[in-house]
Amino acid sequence: NHKLQDNSTPISDFSTIDQALFNWLDETLDIQCTTNEGLKKVPVIWFSTERSYQIKVQKDNRDENGFLDFPQIMVERKSATLTSVNDRPIPGIIKGSGDYKNNQFGFWKKISQIKTRNFANATSQRLYNQQNFKFKNNEIVNEFVFVPYPSYYDMTYEISLKAIYMQQINEMVAPLQRFGPIYNSQVFMIHYNGFKFEAFLPKETGFKTNAPDIGDDEKIYESKFTIKVLGFTTTSQTSQTTPNIVYREGPAKIRISRERVILGDVDANGDPFRE
């Protein structure tokens, strides 16, 4: 019974976490550096993008000979490790509901105005012989929202800054070095599509260059960062058989029927027993 989800509920998967980090680099930091054409925004690209796609679509990142045009920032997801139980925000296991929807994690509720109004009108009609009579109504129907149990992951990303001048590397590294100390912490938040994830800046910055061994190759300077992101996923995507979001209604009143009512007994006058 695998099918595409037919609701617009936001979901979090690996691509959501990737996009959150990409947007932080590309939009929040918005790294600029000095080039032969003046001050220019440094493009951010995924290292995993196919070479044919880069040549055909991302032409601005390459020169007329098809070689990469520096400076550039490359992002690569290096690993995704399931977070240990003791480090998860929700360490325990929440059992499913047992029905076909089987969503376990409740995160939001609101009053169902239509169902609550219906109960109030019925009580008003029975007690005061008219609807919409003003009285204190204790029969409230709540609507609960459930989603699948999130899976938490420790994501590791490698940020590679490449340029042909050391000055450009210094200008590109500066925003990354200054981002953490401004808040006196190496921790920051990244956001995408309504989800937010905790990320950690490294304390060490690596530098390397091929300048000492340069031959026919072009001189390149490179600086690498490793950023850790605490992410989570909320869907199995196309393999998921349950909805991404489930709405359930709570009871307005709990009634426990007496034994005679359940069995349908009648009193001495032949009338059925009531609750």
Image (cartoon, rainbow, N blue to C red):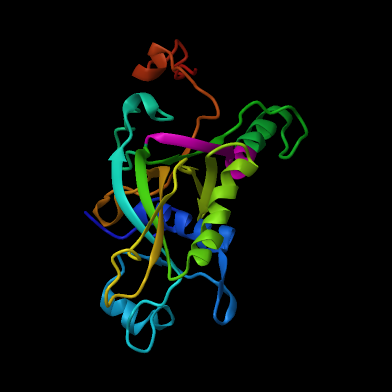
Toward the bottom, the furthest residue is 64
Is residue 115 covered in magenta? yes
Task: Please provide percent x and percent y for residue 166.
Answer: 48, 64
Task: Please provide percent x and percent y for residue 58.
Answer: 39, 79
User: In the image, which residues are magenta?
Assistant: 104-118
- Quadrant of the rendered structure where residue 73 is? bottom left
The residue under the point 53% across, 59% down is 170
Q: Is residue 16 above or below residue 115?
A: below
Is residue 96 in view? yes
> Which quarter of the figure is the N terminus placed in?
bottom left
> Going by the image, does 140 lie left or right of 160?
right
Toward the right, the furthest residue is 134
Toward the top, the furthest residue is 268
Is residue 194 in view? no
Q: Is residue 175 above or below residue 202?
A: below
Task: Please provide percent x and percent y for residue 214.
Answer: 30, 70
Tally of numbered tags: 0
Task: Please provide percent x and percent y for residue 188.
Answer: 54, 43
**Viewer-proximal residue among 20 and 79:** 79
Toward the left, the furthest residue is 1
**Viewer-proximal residue among 208 and 250:** 208
**Viewer-proximal residue among 171 and 130:** 171
Is residue 157 covered in magenta? no
> Going by the image, does 41 lie left or right of 19?
right
The residue under the point 24% across, 53% down is 239
The residue under the point 55% across, 49% down is 177
- Quadrant of the rendered structure where residue 53 is? bottom left
**Viewer-proximal residue among 39 and 79:** 39
